[in-house]
Amino acid sequence: MHHSKPKRIKSISDFHRLRGLPKPEHPLISVIRADAFTHLSGRDSMNMVFDFYFIALKRIEGVKYKYGQLQYDFKDNGTLFFMSPNQVLNIEINKQEIPENQSGWMLLIHPDFIWNTSLAKNIHKYEFFDYSVNEALSLSGKEEKIIRGIIENIEQEYQSNIDKFSKQIIISHIEALLNYSERFYYRQFITREKANHQILTSLEKLLTGYFNNDDLVSKGLPTVHYVAEKLNVSTSYLGSLLRVLTGQKHIHGKLIEKAKEKLSTSDLSVSEIAYELGFEHSQSFSRLFKSKTKLSPLEFRTSFN
């Protein structure tokens, strides 16, 4: 695996030049078709950091992508993935494995293109820009067709005569692309029930182990970062998954369960229990307990006696 220092690619023109492609038709936005890569020869591996947004639909065999520590070799349906500026992408290309008829594309968007638009303010709410490569979006045939239509509209718009409406129209298409992707991700969270429930089962096991271990005092509450690392998923993906599949903060649920157990079976004071569960202040423990159970810890305990 090639682990050289990543090459920073500052502009879309630089990326075109680097890949031996013709100059982009627009300096700040470009759609590159997969068949543009057929001229590559032998093995080609590179680490890159882009100063622009990179969205790709991957149907190319013989090309491996890696970012967020994980490698993915896309062989199934069209797979869509998203990167924001400053993420490291490793692309490994094996010319021998690339079939002649490629389909797929890349959309490159420079932040200057969306500067001062509604999209610039909102692009951060699309959490999938921070997912790892193995958390990419697998599209159904119908979904891929919708996305392909949007990409064709973007391409057509910047290739035709640029006028004062072009930019806003392209921005609207990009927003549609991101909104559809959000919808399709939601569908993926629900339909990939088995894989996602395996993550939830592992999470359940991890948290049970964590809360049954008595050194919560020194460890404090598990952070989302800690949990995501243990489960080998990105923090953003874990957050989205939990919101969609459980509608509640899993960690808090586990915590309340443990607190109820201690309140009903031990003589520890509320502040001792709060301390054991990793809270610095018993007030914040009591607040959380009441918000989840509608009872204060003492009221809960009284209901048992």
Image: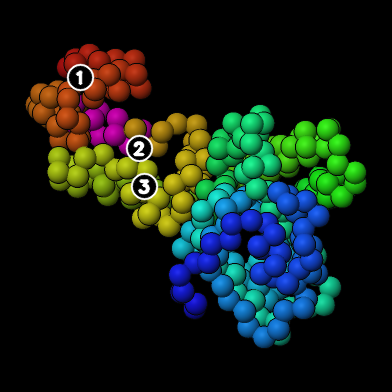
Q: How many marks?
A: 3
**Residue marked by disc 3:** 225
When the figure is inspected, residue 17 is found, relative to residue 150, above or below; the finding is: below
In this view, the mark in front (2 or 3): 3
| Viewer-nearest residue: 32 or 291 | 32
When the figure is inspected, residue 67 is found, relative to residue 39, above or below; the finding is: above
Q: Main secondary structure of the magenta part?
A: helix
Q: Residues within 10 Å of mark 1 (few under 14, many from 20)?
A: few
Tell me which numbered mark, 1 or 2, is placed earlier along the sequence.
2
Say what amino acid the circle numbered 1 marks: Gln
**Residue marked by disc 1:** 283
The CA distance from mark 1 to mark 2 is 18 Å
- Residue 280 visible (yes or no): yes
Classify residue 157 by image quadrant: top right
Classify residue 265 by image quadrant: top left
Q: Residue 180 colored magenta?
A: no
Query: Residue at 77% across / 51% down in the picture?
Result: 26
Q: Residues within 10 Å of mark 3 (few under 14, many from 20)?
A: some
Query: Residue at 52% across / 48% down in the picture?
Result: 130
- State the extent of the magenta-drawn residues as a range: 253-263
**Residue marked by disc 2:** 251
Q: In the shown orientation, is residue 113 left or right of residue 169?
A: left
In this view, the mark in front (1 or 2): 1
Query: Residue at 52% across / 40% down in the picture?
Result: 240
